Amino acid sequence: MKPGSLGGAQNGNEATDLEGVGQAVFERFNEVTRNIHGRIDLPTGEPIAQIVVAGFAKDYGPEVWLLTFEVKQDLQREDYFNTHITRPTFSQSWPPEKGQPHTLVEFQYPPESASPTLLDLLQKKDPRVEKIATSDAKMSAVSSLLLAGDSKKILPADAIQFMRAALGAIAPENARETVCVITEDAGLQWVLQPPAEAKPLKPLNTPQAEKDERPGGAPSLLHPTSN
């Protein structure tokens, strides 16, 4: 399937925004992997990376695409491989095909560790999400419309409240959670921002590290203390 525009141009040979994202990531991956000469062991059919791209295209509406990258290795000699990443394949997940339900779109990685989706849990009345779905009339309406494949009727504020509660209920302990909303007018807005990344540890036993850690005025080899 040809990638959609996500706001990009589709005239002549000009690449769309989505294709540009795929190309940029593809090039960066190959900059890194060309220095890998050991064997990479992945389960059969498992991609090395997947990227979910969501946006709102003018005159088209919301789009969600899955970009999949695979790794290829060519044996040059014993235990020495040339490694490269394939160009991404594009799979459109939203909008659904005509006649298909408008409901949750969910992705999991890696494939072999996939757990039941939130929609699966709703259908099976899992106690964790059933408690939320029956907590009040609004949450009950959200759950019913998702199960009926009629999510377009859900109010954004109700959807956000439901998703935050449901994901919080089923997420593993200490899992990183982020929530954002994408609209035509305001673009991307964070509801729950990504947690701050931990600062990398400073290298030890280097002149720069010693300089960074030494308080001002402390003695050094160049300026020892005088008695």
Image (tube, rainbow, N blue to C red):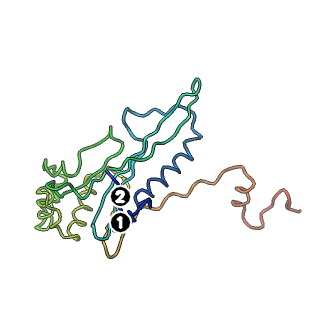
Kind of residue at badge 2: Glu
Residue picked out by circle 2 = 177
State left or right for residue 130 relative to residue 207: left
Q: Is residue 165 above or below residue 74?
A: below
Farthest right residue in view:
227
Q: Quadrant of the C terminus?
A: bottom right
- The number of callouts visible is 2
Q: Are marks 1 and 2 in contact (CB under 8 Å)?
A: yes
State left or right for residue 131 relative to residue 22: left
Residue picked out by circle 1 = 192
Q: CA distance from mark 1 to mark 2?
A: 7 Å
The disc label shown at residue 218, or none: none
Residue 125 placement (x, y as % from top left): 13, 50
Farthest top residue in view:
78
The residue shown at (33%, 63%) is 179
Farthest front residue in view:
12
The residue shown at (36%, 68%) is 190
From the viewer's side, name the closer residue of 121 and 84. 84
Task: Tell me the element at label 1.
Answer: strand
* Mark 2 crowd level (few <14, some 14–19, many ≥20, 10 Å Cα): few
Residue 171 placement (x, y as % from top left): 30, 52
Q: Earlier in the sequence, mark 1 or mark 2?
A: 2
